[in-house]
């Protein structure tokens, strides 16, 4: 398939520790909201435990809480704590069957620790559409981002998240808790800690959060200088949230 490229929507949070019932309820809300955006968000096939699972391979739509709770429970993660095997969270994923015009997949990672937000609690939705119809992404990314915000109540969420504070790849990159993106959402607490960047679309949401949008066109940070400049302005605005960010040996995937 000749895709325009993958676009990722990611939502991250910290603090709350949820059981399988509350996790299933949030997952059901996310899947229901996505289906209202586009019929392409149907036909989710769960991954893992294909033979032994009590859950159908094709996730029931509209979502069934009991089914999703069983799926979450089947995908617990464990670690050794004080020499004992301990339940430390959940990790599960699913994908929409690839068609001629759309492909999507999501991963939920919810660990109970809170050291680094970007490593611990997140919902990641990745979508592909063919090059012949890139405008389709423009129609679904904003409502898709807001759907995840409504379902997961994150601190931060973004479309096409990355560290846009540099135009070159470097060996030792600062891996930010709150990176920039095509669109960036911040909850009320974090929104109150930043100054609004100039020359980007700024929306104040009913829940007190803020949505920053670099461009309402199809985002092309590599080839479009105006898009790159807007992404940099958003990244600069997020600087107060990234004081003491972790530096790791990994490249920033951004070249001019």
Image (tube, helix red, strand yellow):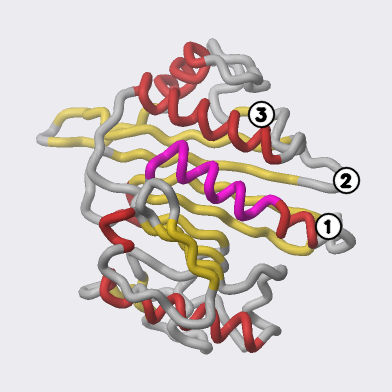
> Residue at left 38%, top 58%?
186
| Image spot of residue 254 (x, y percent) | 56, 80
Asked if the residue under mark 2 is in contact with the one under mark 3, i.e. CB atoms within 8 Å, the reply is no
The residue under label 3 is 45
Indicate yes or no whether the magenta region holds residue 141. yes
| Image spot of residue 178 (x, y percent) | 36, 65
> Residue at left 39%, top 51%?
12
The residue under label 1 is 130
Q: Quadrant of residue 113?
A: top left
Question: The residue tagged with tag 1: helix, strand or loop?
Answer: strand
Asked if the residue under mark 1 is in contact with the one under mark 2, i.e. CB atoms within 8 Å, the reply is yes
Disc 1 crowd rating (10 Å Cα; few below 14, some 14-19, many 20+) is some
Task: Name the disc covering residue 64, or none.
Answer: none
Judged left or right of residue 248, residue 100 is right
Tell which circle, 2 or 1, labels the residue nearer the N-terminal end.
2
Q: Is residue 177 above or below residue 172?
A: above
Looking at the rendered image, the quarter that the N terminus falls into is: bottom right
Looking at the rendering, the stretch of residues picked out in magenta corresponds to 140-153
Task: Name the disc covering residue 100, or none.
Answer: 2
Question: The residue tagged with tag 2: helix, strand or loop?
Answer: loop
Q: Is residue 99 above or below residue 234?
A: above
Indicate yes or no whether the magenta region holds residue 243. no
Q: Quadrant of residue 221?
A: bottom right
Q: Main secondary structure of the magenta part?
A: helix
| Image spot of residue 68 (x, y percent) | 50, 20
Tell which circle, 3 or 2, labels the residue nearer the N-terminal end.
3
Residue 113 appears in the picture as rendered? yes
Judged left or right of residue 131, residue 48 is left
Q: How many numbered dots are placed on residues in this image? A: 3
Disc 3 crowd rating (10 Å Cα; few below 14, some 14-19, many 20+) is some
| Image spot of residue 84 (x, y percent) | 16, 29
Disc 2 crowd rating (10 Å Cα; few below 14, some 14-19, many 20+) is few
């Amino acid at each position: 398939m000749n895709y325009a490229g993958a676009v990722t929507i990611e939502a991250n949070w910290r603090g709350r520790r949820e059981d399988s019932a509350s996790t299933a309820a949030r997952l059901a809300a996310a899947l229901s909201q996505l289906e209202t955006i586009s019929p392409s968000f149907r036909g989710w096939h769960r991954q893992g435990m294909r033979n032994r699972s009590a859950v159908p391979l094709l996730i029931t739509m509209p979502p069934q809480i009991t089914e999703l709770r069983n799926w979450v429970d089947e995908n617990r993660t464990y670690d050794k704590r004080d020499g004992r095997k301990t339940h430390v969270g959940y990790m599960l994923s699913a994908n929409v069957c690839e068609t001629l015009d759309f492909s999507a997949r999501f991963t939920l990672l919810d660990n109970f620790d809170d050291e680094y937000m970007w490593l611990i609690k997140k919902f990641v939705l990745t979508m592909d559409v063919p090059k012949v119809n890139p405008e389709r992404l423009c129609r679904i990314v904003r409502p898709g981002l807001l759907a995840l915000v409504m379902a997961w109540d994150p601190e931060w969420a973004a479309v096409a998240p990355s560290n846009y504070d540099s135009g070159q790849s470097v060996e030792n990159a600062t891996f930010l808790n709150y990176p920039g993106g095509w669109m960036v959402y911040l909850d009320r607490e974090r929104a109150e800690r930043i100054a609004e960047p100039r020359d980007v679309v700024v929306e104040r949401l009913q829940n007190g959060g803020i949505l920053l949008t670099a461009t309402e066109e199809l985002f092309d940070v590599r080839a479009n200088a105006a898009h790159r400049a807007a992404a940099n302005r958003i990244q600069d605005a997020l600087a107060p949230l990234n004081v003491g960010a972790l530096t790791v040996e990994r490249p920033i995937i951004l070249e001019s």
